[in-house]
Image (cartoon, rainbow, N blue to C red):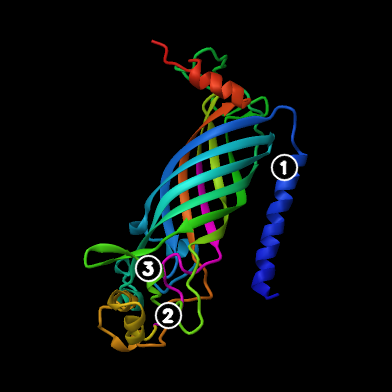
Amino acid sequence: MKYKNYKYFLHFCLIILLLASTSAFAQRKKKFEATFGLGATNFYGELGGANQIGRDYFYDYDLKANRPVINLGLRYQTCEFAAVKTNLFYGLLKGSDQYTKEQYRNNRNLSFRSPVFEFSSQVEISFLKDKGKNFFKVPWVYGKKVVKVKKGKRNGVWDYYPYGFVGIGVFYFNPKAQYNGKWTALQPLGTEGQGLNGTEKYKKIGLSIPYGVGLKYKVDNLITVSLDVGVRKTFTDYIDDVSGDYYDKAELNRTYGPVSAALSDPSLGDHPNWTVTGEQRGDPTDKDSYLFAVVSVNYRFQNFKQLYQDLFKKKLRPKF
């Protein structure tokens, strides 16, 4: 087994151990939270990026590439310092060499966009106690006893707290590029010769390792607001359809047609020797990743029966 495979296996084992440890610390007062979030995505790969040679993660952050993401989730509080959360995300990823002034990438002139669906689970470890106490009063919460207190710390419990998280997920992507004003799926076109000479086309479903930090603010015993900023480490280099070297355009034209040949090399032409067959198009040693930054509103409930009563038996309603 290669070193990289050992590294991925160790990551997976670490996640399993964290999941097991949170279950072991479970207490009697277990809390659920239904979450709804909106935020932004950013892509870290070959395309676009900062005005420099490509670097990992935030060093290659490109504000112009931000796109929206929406999130639904369910969090389970296992103890005062830990929770397990399951998420469903839908967002868009974008990258374009037009966004960077770095000479090589700008001349390459590649671009893509892709939907991304992610189903993931993560362990959250808080750095402060979370006992689920009553905090700030929300006027429209009907029939719930809340206690208005000063902001900050009360009896060893905080109304806001930071946490870190790590998990595992499955995601779907489908990169597309514009050709004659239409968005065209890139994977079937084999723009780097995938499917030729014994090679296979890449899969559009992969594993991800989400990890990051968050900050939660307690509004009262029912409502919390949280901010999560997390990177998704993946094991594919084709989210943007770019990984290896330039392929023979004549063969691409014969096999997949003129659209494949055109999208394999839409370079500006200022440096034609940079994009001939066999020259570097991407970097297969550096896998793609993406970022989710999401603000969520979370509703606490003891069990699903209580949630049903709150939603459908009018226990939550405005007071006029």
Residue behind mark 1: 22
Residue behind mark 3: 186
Q: Is residue 89 above or below residue 14?
A: above
Taking the image as shown, residue 276 lies to the left or right of residue 288, namely left
Query: Which of these two is toward me, 201 or 218?
Result: 201
Q: In the rendered image, which quarter is residue 256 located in?
A: bottom left
Q: Give the mark nearest the N terminus, 1 or 2.
A: 1
Q: Secondary structure at mark 2?
A: loop
Mark in front: 1 vs 2: 2
Which segment is the magenta one? 227-246
Q: Is residue 164 magenta?
A: no
At 54% from the left and 33% from the top, the residue drawn is 34
Q: Say which mark, if any, is on residue 193.
A: 2
Q: Secondary structure at mark 3?
A: loop
Query: Residue 284 in the image: x percent, y percent?
Result: 50, 76
Q: Give the mark nearest the N terminus, 1 or 3.
A: 1
Structural distance between the alpha carbons of marks 1 and 2:
46 Å
At 49% from the left and 70% from the top, the residue drawn is 202
Q: Secondary structure at mark 1?
A: helix
Query: Residue 212 in the image: x percent, y percent?
Result: 56, 51
At 48% from the left and 85% from the top, the residue drawn is 197
In the rendered structure, which amino acid carries the disc numbered 3?
Answer: Leu
Taking the image as shown, residue 52 lies to the left or right of residue 6, namely left
